[in-house]
Amino acid sequence: MLSLSAHKFHGPKGVGALLIRQGIRFDNLIDGGAQEKNRRAGTENVAGAVGMATALQICCSRMEQRNQRLTAMRNRLIDGLLTAIPRSRLNGDRNQRLPGNLNISFEGIEGESLLLLLDMNGICASSGSACTSGSLDPSHVLMALGLKHEVAHGSLRLTLSEDITDEDIDYILDTIPGIVFRLREMSPLWEEIVKQETV
């Protein structure tokens, strides 16, 4: 099976597709709807489906160029943040990841405070997946990668879209280090890290 959400490739929100390999059997969540082979009741969102199909065609037609551009921007962002901010680390493999995705942890800070200050500076970011956005716990994926609880708590996830510009990357690189340093100045956890280093 493969599920697709149209908004992930600049299609309309609220529409998606589910591809099911022939021969896969599953139970219905909602019965009815002859137009859906009795698998689901309700009126089909034809306009949404057409919009999704068009967005997918556009996305696929320029995927290679888009991915090269996003990969270069992502790598510039990774290099810039890791160079500017001591005790930061890239989570996951540098190359085996989506072109526009990066997740970095900064020791000695809380991810929620970081997100609040980024938002105040016009930078949209996340500390984890949308699926766990209501949770204050650190990402179970980062914990499975072996990060300590307090390091995983200071993680930042940025996703770049094809609309991002070099000027946007410059702004992010100019803004995030200052915010991290400001938060570290207020952090008892960072004080403890610094003390341990000087002992």
Image (cartoon, rainbow, N blue to C red):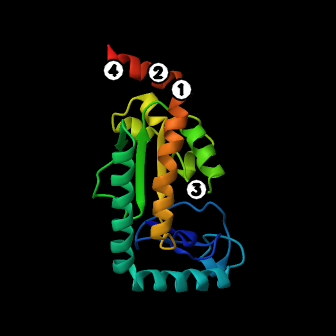
How packed mark 1 is, by other alpha carbons closer than 10 Å (few <14, some 14-19, many 20 or more), is some
Horizontal arrangement in the rendering, residue 12 relative to residue 71 (left or right): right
In the picture of the structure, the residue carrying the numbered disc 3 is 123
In the picture of the structure, the residue carrying the numbered disc 2 is 191
Between 179 and 154, which is closer to the camera in this rendering?
179
Horizontal arrangement in the rendering, residue 12 relative to residue 148 (left or right): right
Q: Nearer the viewer, mark 2 or mark 3?
A: 2
Between 111 and 9, which is closer to the camera in this rendering?
111
Q: Amino acid at mark 4?
A: Glu
Residue 33 visible: yes
How packed mark 3 is, by other alpha carbons closer than 10 Å (few <14, some 14-19, many 20 or more), is some
In the picture of the structure, the residue carrying the numbered disc 1 is 187
- Mark 2: secondary structure: helix
In the picture of the structure, the residue carrying the numbered disc 4 is 197
In the picture shown, does residue 98 fall above or below 90?
below
Mark 1 or mark 3: whose residue is earlier in sequence:
3
Viewport quadrant of the N terminus: bottom left
Measured Cα–Cα span from mark 2 to mark 4: 10 Å
Q: Amino acid at mark 3?
A: Ile
Q: Amino acid at mark 1?
A: Ser
- Mark 3: secondary structure: loop
- Within the image, what quadrant is residue 117 found in? top right
Q: Position of residue 124 (x, y in %)?
A: 58, 56
